[in-house]
């Protein structure tokens, strides 16, 4: 059963379909997965506005997104809440650990902002805002 005003995490294709999603679900979080909704080859600038309009918290491991003008523009224009896993260790276990450790901080900061948000998330659960 979902909690009132519970945020929904949207897992980008760069993270995969299972390990992080399952870890978050097992911790009681609501999760949607990119590949359950969009074709694998859907461009970020095409799906970002749709997901942002649904007020989802977007989790990605695609650090290159931070340097792509079309994606940054899509994040800004859609007021997306984007959280980028930014540690060197990119295993499912490491990403799960980082996102789980940061989950409450992620939800808190996402709910406190009405504009777009770009935040790096690290394996130890620390976060750093990097709005561009």
Image (cartoon, grey):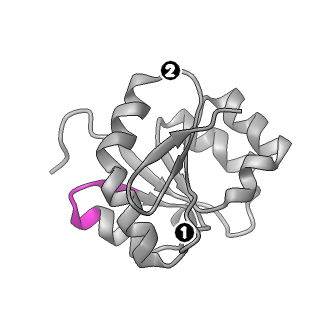
113 vs 5, nearest the viewer: 113
Q: Hey, which residue is sitting farthest top in the picture?
A: 114
Residue 70 placed where, x, y %?
83, 42
What's drawn in magenta, residue-wise? 25-31
Dot 1 or dot 2, earlier in sequence: 1
Residue 66 placed where, x, y %?
73, 48
- Left or right relative to 64: residue 116: left
Q: Residue at x 27, y 54 (%)?
A: 29
Image quarter for residue 51? top right
Q: Residues within 10 Å of mark 1 (few under 14, many from 20)?
A: many
- Left or right relative to 124: residue 38: right
Q: Residues within 10 Å of mark 2 (few under 14, many from 20)?
A: few
Q: Residue at x 64, y 33 (%)?
A: 131
Task: Label 1, secondary structure: give it.
Answer: loop
35 vs 117, nearest the viewer: 117
Q: How many numbered discs, if any? A: 2
Residue 96 placed where, x, y %?
39, 68
- Left or right relative to 108: residue 46: right
- According to the picture, the residue beneath numbered tag 1 turns out to be 15
- According to the picture, the residue beneath numbered tag 2 turns out to be 114
Where 7 sits versus 113, above or below? below
Q: Residue at x 69, y 30 (%)?
A: 76
Q: Residue at x 58, y 36 (%)?
A: 80
Where 50 sits versus 111, above or below? below
Residue 24's disc number: none
- Left or right relative to 34: residue 113: left
């Amino acid at each position: 059963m979902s909690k009132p005003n519970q945020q929904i995490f949207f897992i980008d294709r760069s993270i995969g379909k299972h390990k992080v999603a399952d870890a978050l679900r097992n911790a009681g979080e609501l999760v949607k997965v990119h590949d359950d909704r969009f074709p694998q080859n859907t461009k970020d600038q095409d799906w970002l506005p749709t997901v942002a309009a649904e007020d989802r918290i977007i989790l990605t491991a695609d650090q290159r997104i931070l340097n792509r003008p079309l994606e940054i523009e899509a994040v800004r224009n859609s007021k997306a809440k984007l959280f980028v896993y930014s540690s060197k260790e990119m295993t499912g276990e490491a990403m799960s650990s980082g996102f789980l450790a940061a989950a409450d901080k992620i939800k808190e900061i996402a709910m406190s902002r009405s504009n777009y948000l770009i935040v790096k998330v690290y394996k130890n659960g620390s976060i750093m805002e990097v709005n561009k």
